[in-house]
Amino acid sequence: MFSILWRFFPGPAWLRVIILLLAAAALVYALIFYIYPWVATLLPEPEVTVE
């Protein structure tokens, strides 16, 4: 998978590393702020009882 991304992006190696780091950061940002909260609304809430 990494080799496919490495060949896809143009430029010298240092530019590819920066682009891949930015793409990874954008993916993590999207997961944390958009995908995970949306999935959390679809999951049932656990029933917790304390005696």
Image (cartoon, helix red, strand yellow):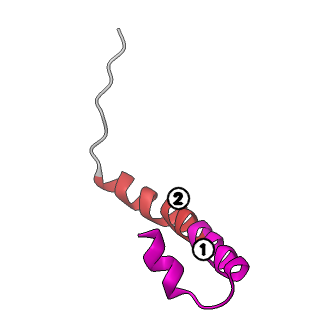
Quadrant in which the C terminus appears: top left
Quadrant in which the N terminus appears: bottom left
Residue at the top extreme?
51
The answer to which of 9 and 45 lies nearer the viewer is 9
Amino acid type of the residue tagged 2 in the rendering: Ile
Amino acid type of the residue tagged 1 in the rendering: Leu
Q: Is residue 51 above or below residue 37?
A: above
Residue marked by disc 1? 20
Q: Residue sitting at 57 percent across and 68 percent down?
A: 24
Residue marked by disc 2? 32
Q: Is residue 49 magenta?
A: no
Q: Residue sitting at 55 percent across and 62 percent down?
A: 28
The answer to which of 35 and 47 lies nearer the viewer is 35
Considering the numbered disc 1 on the image, is that residue within a helix, a strand or a loop?
helix
Q: Position of residue 29 (x, y in %)?
A: 58, 65
Q: Residue sitting at 64 percent across and 80 percent down?
A: 16
**Circle 2 crowding by C-alpha within 10 Å: few under 14, some 14–19, many from 20:** few
Compute the Cα span from label 1 to label 2.
18 Å
Rendered image: mark on residue 48 = none
Q: Nearer the viewer, mark 1 or mark 2?
A: 1
Q: Residue sitting at 61 percent across and 67 percent down?
A: 25
Left/right placement of residue 51 relative to residue 7 reads left
Q: Is residue 31 above or below residue 11?
A: above
Residue 4: image quadrant is: bottom left
Q: Magenta region: which residues?
A: 1-25
**Circle 1 crowding by C-alpha within 10 Å: few under 14, some 14–19, many from 20:** some
